[in-house]
């Protein structure tokens, strides 16, 4: 039996919350000229009239207002703005159907979702880079919002929603009329950017892409129609790009060949306003070119010098310590073929991010959450502390007491060496957290009330996850047993 959702959409509480959301977002009047202030003058009467139109099936959305906005990096973004009353109704519908879609959306999608952000997407990219995923498919979809196929989208919506009234309402919004100056035109495909329901429907449309790439064990980070696929080899990246093109073809979309590229972290790339290069990530001016991206990967590796002491210094350090090369096995350099990189474990951790103080007279200090390197009282470098895993101090380079205390608190070890690289010792924190944690765990193990609450939460989570899994299978395999299980 189809679950009716329209009654929940049209409750007093839901419509009032939708109005509050629309008013909070502000925005201009639509094609009817009615502003938010105008609508608020007779708020409850207008909400009641809107509800009656929907119930009596006399509701018709008004034409969308075409608006041009300048992009920060140049160019124009075209928006199609619904009227205030249409924005309220779309927001009311979004509030009801969003939880149904969210239960199905994948963890790789970060745009237009509560509790998700650009910062989380950046953190995921950095985590994968540290695990050895250094080849990147940086992809962009050509005219995504303007090319969404209405038939395919309504089919996808129908997998989650069976309420015929709500489906008819969504179809009305998709096939809206746009007023551009004095001209009116019917929308044949695409979603109106500027409508409250557009972000949710756009994520649903690309849910098929998310599932297809994840089913092929690919590491995907998607933010609306911009996305990255991270791979451990160039061959895998090329295969991922080919698969992406095929899946987008199924959605009647195409890649923007001008913006889509295959690139390595050593060359650097920009995504979501953040510049990535090697293990670094920092916000940049959108107009600033990525000069390294134009170079072949070998040239980039030769351009950026390694952050290590010189070979002569290391050799001298061994001599000072009274050690001979014969006491150590010969070092063999092994070059991995592209397919060999796949043999690396998923949790492979590359070299720690190390800050080296090599110059005589350098002083490492601390300002806020940043480590600051000074030379002759002039700042020569500032590094966010979160990007430093360990510090190597050579010779007469110094570190301030404040910086040392901060590193101990953040568990960043400081290694002291001679100017030639001879190891003196390490300054590191004495970590008692595991012991304190274990003590608390043993104490709580004797608390029957706490144990019961914990067990209840675990069982609740297991049941909820199992139900979501059964719902997914029920959509793909229409059997009486599965339908009964999720009824």
Image (spheres, helix red, strand yellow):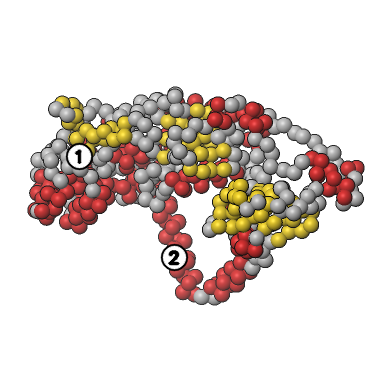
Q: Are marks 2 and 1 in contact (CB under 8 Å)?
A: no
Query: Going by the picture, which residue comes out furthest to the front?
Result: 376
Element under disc 1: loop
Q: Is residue 409 above or below residue 231?
A: below
Instruction: Report the residue marked by disc 1.
Output: 82
Residue at 65% from the left image edge and 51% from the top image edge? 376
In the image, residue 430 above or below residue 333: below
Task: Tell me if 343 is positioned left or right of 277 in this view.
Answer: right
Viewer-closest of 198 and 344: 198
State the image coordinates of residue 461 (x, y, percent, origin top left).
Answer: 44, 58
Mark nearer the viewer, 2 or 1:
1
Q: Could one spot residue 113 in this view of the protein? A: yes
Q: Quadrant of residue 324?
A: top right
Q: Which residue is mark 2?
A: 456
Residue 95 at x, y = what percent?
Answer: 27, 50
- Which quadrant holds residue 186? top left
Determine whether 466 is above or below 252 in the image: below
Whichever of labels 2 and 1 marks the residue nearer the N terminus, that label is: 1
Give the CA distance from mark 2 to mark 1.
46 Å
Q: Residues within 10 Å of mark 2 (few under 14, many from 20)?
A: few
Q: Residue at 70% across / 32% down in the picture? A: 336
* Image x and y of residue 471, in percent: 37, 46
Residue beneath the point at 75% across and 44% down: 309
Q: Is residue 184 left or right of residue 475?
A: left
* Residue 388 percent coordinates (x, y): 61, 51
Could you tell whether 359 is left or right of 84 in the image? right
- At mark 2, the secondary structure is helix
Residue toward you, 328 or 471: 328
């Amino acid at each position: 039996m189809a679950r009716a959702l329209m009654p929940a959409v049209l409750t007093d509480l839901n419509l009032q919350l939708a109005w509050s959301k629309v008013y909070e977002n502000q925005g201009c009047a639509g094609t009817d000229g009615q502003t938010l202030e105008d609508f608020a003058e007779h708020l409850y009467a207008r909400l009641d009239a809107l509800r009656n139109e929907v119930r009596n099936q006399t509701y018709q959305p008004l034409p969308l207002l075409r608006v041009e906005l300048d992009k920060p990096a140049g160019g124009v973004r075209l928006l199609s703005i619904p009227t205030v009353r249409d924005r309220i109704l779309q927001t009311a519908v979004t509030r009801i159907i969003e939880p149904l879609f969210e239960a199905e959306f994948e963890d790789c999608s970060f745009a237009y979702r509560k509790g998700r952000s650009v910062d989380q997407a950046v953190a995921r990219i950095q985590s994968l880079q540290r695990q050895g995923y250094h080849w990147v498919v940086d992809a962009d979809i050509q005219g995504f919002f303007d090319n969404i196929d209405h038939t395919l989208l309504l089919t996808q919506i129908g997998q989650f929603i069976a309420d015929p009234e709500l489906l008819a309402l969504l179809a009305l919004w998709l096939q809206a009329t746009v007023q551009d100056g004095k001209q009116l035109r019917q929308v044949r495909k695409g979603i109106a950017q500027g409508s409250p329901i557009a972000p949710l429907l756009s994520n649903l449309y690309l849910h098929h892409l998310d599932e297809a790439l994840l089913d092929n064990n690919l590491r995907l980070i998607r933010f609306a129609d911009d996305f990255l696929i991270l791979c451990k080899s160039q061959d895998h990246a090329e295969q991922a790009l080919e698969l992406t093109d095929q899946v987008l073809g199924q959605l009647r979309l195409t890649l923007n060949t001008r913006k889509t590229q295959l690139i390595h972290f050593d060359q650097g790339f920009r995504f979501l306003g953040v510049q990535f290069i090697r293990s670094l990530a920092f916000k940049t001016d959108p107009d600033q070119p990525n000069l390294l991206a134009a170079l072949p990967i070998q040239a980039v590796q030769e351009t950026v010098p390694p952050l290590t002491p010189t070979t002569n210094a290391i050799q001298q350090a061994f001599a000072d310590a009274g050690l001979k090369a014969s006491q150590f096995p010969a070092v063999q350099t092994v070059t991995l073929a592209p397919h060999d990189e796949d043999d690396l474990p998923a949790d492979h951790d590359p070299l720690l991010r190390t800050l080296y103080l090599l110059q005589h007279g350098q002083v490492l200090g601390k300002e806020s959450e940043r480590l600051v390197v000074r030379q002759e009282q002039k700042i020569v470098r500032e590094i966010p502390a979160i990007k430093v895993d360990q510090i190597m101090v050579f010779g007469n380079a110094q570190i301030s007491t404040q910086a040392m205390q901060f590193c101990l608190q953040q568990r960043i070890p400081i290694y002291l060496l001679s100017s030639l690289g001879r190891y003196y010792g390490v300054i590191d924190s004495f970590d008692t957290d595991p012991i304190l944690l274990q003590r608390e765990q043993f104490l709580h193990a004797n608390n029957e009330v706490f144990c019961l609450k914990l067990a209840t939460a675990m069982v609740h989570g297991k049941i909820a996850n199992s139900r979501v899994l059964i719902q997914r299978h029920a959509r793909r395999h229409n059997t009486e047993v599965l339908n009964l299980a999720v009824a």
